[in-house]
Amino acid sequence: MSFWQKIKQSFRNFMVGRNGADYLSMALLWTGLLAYLLGSIIGSIRASVVFPLIGMLLNLVGFAAYVFSIFRLFSRNVEKRRAENRRYVTMMEKKSTERRQAKVRFQNRKKYKYFKCPGCKAWLRLPRGSGVVTVTCSRCHTSFTQKG
């Protein structure tokens, strides 16, 4: 067994029972990198006293994101880290769905009028030019009038 294979195997043994990399840890690493780069760029602006302070604050945020990410990588409390990652992934999927639906609404804005149900806030649509219509929400069964 070569030197590098021994190092790989010892690292694998070290990581047994630890959380390792997941979506939240990787997002924290990228966030830390972005905050650090922005902090470095903004901190180098000497126009006033405010820019270096904002730069230092962004560098501190980036460092904190790195530390928390490394803590999550090596944590042995796997169930808690998995729950955190599950909440993060669910939140990101919800945001992605909202963006995709907003894009579809924007593309179809000339064919349909989009509006929210006053009861459950679900998005509904009517064909444009359909006049005043009594709408019943399919989710909460609230009836209301809406101009199409």
Image (cartoon, helix red, strand yellow):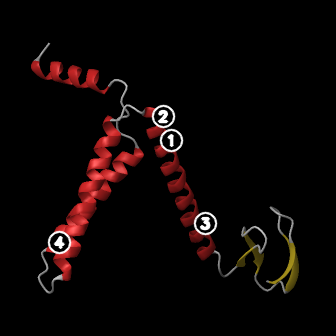
- Name the residue located 14 percent from the left edge and 86 percent from the top edge: 47
Residue that carries the numbered disc 3 in the rendered image: 101
Residue that carries the numbered disc 2 in the rendered image: 79
Single out the mark in the foreground, 3 or 1. 1
Badge 4 crowding class, 10 Å Cα cut-off, few under 14, some 14 to 19, many 20 or more, is few
Check residue 41 in the rendering and tell me which mark sits there, or answer none: 4
Type of amino acid under label 4: Ile
Give the mark, 2 or 4, whose residue is nearer the N terminus.
4
Residue 55 falls left or right of residue 27: left
Do the residues bearing badges 4 and 3 touch, measured as CB atoms within 8 Å?
no
**Residue 106, how many percent across, how many down?**
59, 76
**Residue 29, how many percent across, how many down?**
30, 51
Single out the mark in the foreground, 4 or 1. 1
Type of amino acid under label 3: Gln
Residue that carries the numbered disc 1 in the rendered image: 83
The CA distance from mark 2 to mark 3 is: 33 Å
